[in-house]
């Protein structure tokens, strides 16, 4: 009986020393889970508090229709003014029952470039500064 108790005690001590049966410590160097550009954009838009949408605004799906289209237009060499002029590509952020003031549309454009095409952000902000809109 003494040998059995000694073996059990030894097994408990070894389990405690090796950490078996416990949760592993989180790895401090582990990469955090990536957040999608869409989620980053929606969070930034929420933080921006677009006043134009106080009574009626776009759904997330309607809003997410714009960032990639804007980035594609920038990649084709179009300016921010071109994108935000409603008759030149229909890329101005508005819907059947919601609209966006120009200053807030500019803000949305910058937020979208930061999340969806960050390589275009410097050019877009430079274009907007040149027109006095940023």
Image: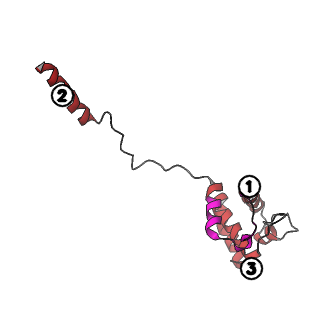
User: Of callouts 1 and 2, which one flags the residue occurring earlier in the amino acid sequence?
Assistant: 2
Q: Is residue 66 magenta?
A: no
Describe residue 99's horizontal placement relative to residue 33 as left or right: right
| Mark 1 → mark 2, Cα distance in angstroms | 60 Å
Screen quadrant of the N terminus: top left
Compared with residue 4, is residue 38 higher up or lower down, i.e. above or below?
below
Residue 91 location in percent, x, y? 81, 64
Q: Quadrant of residue 97?
A: bottom right
- Report helix, strand or loop for mark 3: loop
Q: Residue furthest right?
A: 87
Query: Which residue is disc 1 drawn over?
Result: 61
The residue carrying pointer 2 sits among few (fewer than 14), some (14 to 19) or many (20 or more) residues within 10 Å by Cα, namely few
User: Of callouts 3 and 2, which one flags the residue occurring earlier in the amino acid sequence?
Assistant: 2
| Mark 3 → mark 1, Cα distance in angstroms | 30 Å
Describe residue 82's horizontal placement relative to residue 35 as left or right: right
Q: Mainly helix, strand or loop, the magenta region?
A: helix
| Mark 3 → mark 2, Cα distance in angstroms | 77 Å
Describe residue 96's horizontal placement relative to residue 100 as left or right: right
> Which residue is drawn at the image coordinates 61% and 61% (left, top)?
43
Q: Quadrant of residue 63?
A: bottom right
* Residues in magenta, as a range: 40-59
> Which residue is drawn at the image coordinates 71% and 71% (left, top)?
54
**What numbered label is drawn on residue 131?**
3
Is 8 or 25 nearer to us in this picture? 8
């Amino acid at each position: 009986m003494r040998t059995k108790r000694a073996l059990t005690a030894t097994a408990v001590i070894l389990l405690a020393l090796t950490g078996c049966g416990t949760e592993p410590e989180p790895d401090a160097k582990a990469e955090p889970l990536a957040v999608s550009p869409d989620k980053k954009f929606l969070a930034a838009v929420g933080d921006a508090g677009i006043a134009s949408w106080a009574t009626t605004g776009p759904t997330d799906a309607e809003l997410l229709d714009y960032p990639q289209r804007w980035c594609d237009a920038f990649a084709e060499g179009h300016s921010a003014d071109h994108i935000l002029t409603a008759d030149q590509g229909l890329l101005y952020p508005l819907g059947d029952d919601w609209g966006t003031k120009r200053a807030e549309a500019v803000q949305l454009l910058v937020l979208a470039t930061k999340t969806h095409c960050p390589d275009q952000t410097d050019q877009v902000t430079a274009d907007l500064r040149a027109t006095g809109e940023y």
